[in-house]
Amino acid sequence: MSAEDKTVAKQPKSGGERPGGAEDFRARSLLRPAILLLLKERESHGYELVSRLSELGFDVPDFGGLYRALRGMEDEGLITSSWGTPERGPARRVYALTSDGDASLRQSAPGLVHQRRTIGGLLERYRGLVHQERKSRRNRRRVLVVEDDDDMRHTLWVLLEQRKWLVDEAPDGETALALWAKNPPEIMVLDQRLPDMPGIEVARLVREQGYEGHILLYSAYLSRELEDEAAVLGIQSLNKADFDELFDAMAAFEQEDQPRRRAVRG
């Protein structure tokens, strides 16, 4: 029995994995096209697929469920597998995309677009309800998220609202400056690569106008030169790949700012 087969055998069955259950729905709607996409990029063994799925935002706690999905896709002729023999370590089953799998990936694209539109609509309605409730939450801290990527901006909005922040959003520097002038936040979260000006330029402009709030440069394109420039402006630089680092920085700011807020309330 292979190492992968032993992994499958050890996985306990759960009610969510019955056909038609949540696990089956996830496999059909998102996991399956994700696997096809990754295998179109390159062949992979199971553990490598887990890591690559993680990079796409998938949480794969049940390796057995993943391998069952792979076997099902192989039975349908969407992928093939063979034993690879690496220079070091045990032999591993390597998965590759077939022409039928390639066709299935192309056919899944319209459904994914529709799913994204549906989720976007639900999120927009939820956002509308949250904005209606803002009048009763005046004491909550305000953060301005400046990010041109809609998916990233909406994701940050949801996660920060869950953490009891009032979130204003801007897709570009000009909108950010207008929102800042209207209602300065306690914290600004800035992407560096904005369509009209760099995030560091937005930070420089608000600093020149006397803004003393906390600014986080949250970017996937940090460099030593950019970080040094940010430090001169009193800006903390964070890697966009790590949500936890962002939330930890904001939590630290909240902790540091508590004495000031108590004094204001008093």
Image: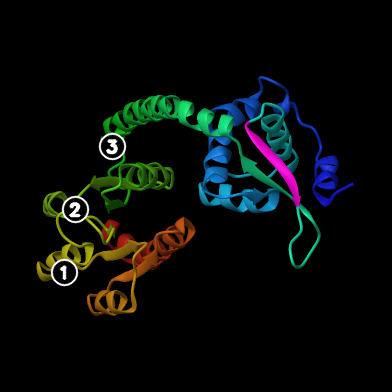
Task: Judge the density around disc 2: few (<14), some (14-19), many (≥20) Cα neighbours within 10 Å.
Answer: few
Residue 134, disc: 3
User: Horizontal and vertical percent for residue 196?
Assistant: 14, 55
User: Toward which corner of the image does residue 119 lie, by quadrant?
Assistant: top left
Whether tag 1 and tag 3 are in contact, CB under 8 A, the answer is no
Which residue is located at x 54 percent, y 28 percent?
A: 29
Provide the major secondary structure of the magenta segment: strand
At 25% across and 36% down in the image, what residue appears?
A: 135
Label 1 near label 2: C-beta < 8 Å? Answer: no
Q: Which mark is residue 204?
A: 1
Residue 201 position in % (x across, y down)? 16, 66
Determine crowd level at label 1: few under 14, some 14-19, many 20+ residues with C-alpha closer than 10 A. some
Q: Amino acid at mark 1?
A: Arg
Question: Where residue 247 appears, x then y in whole percent?
Answer: 44, 57
Viewer-side label of 2, 3: 2
| Residue 68 part of the magenta-drawn span | no
Give the extent of the magenta segment: 78-83
From the viewer's perspective, is 29 left or right of 175?
Answer: right
For the residues labelled 2 and 3, say whether their Cβ atoms are less than 8 Å apart: no
Label located before the other in sequence (2 or 1) = 2
| Left or right: 186 as drawn, with respect to 39 | left
Q: Earlier in the sequence, mark 1 or mark 3?
A: 3
- Residue at numbered disc 2: 195
* First in residue order: circle 2 vs circle 3: 3
Which one is closest to the eye, mark 1 or mark 3? 1
- Amino acid carrying mark 3 in the image: Arg
Residue 172, placed above or below residue 207: above
Residue sitting at x 61%, y 31%: 27
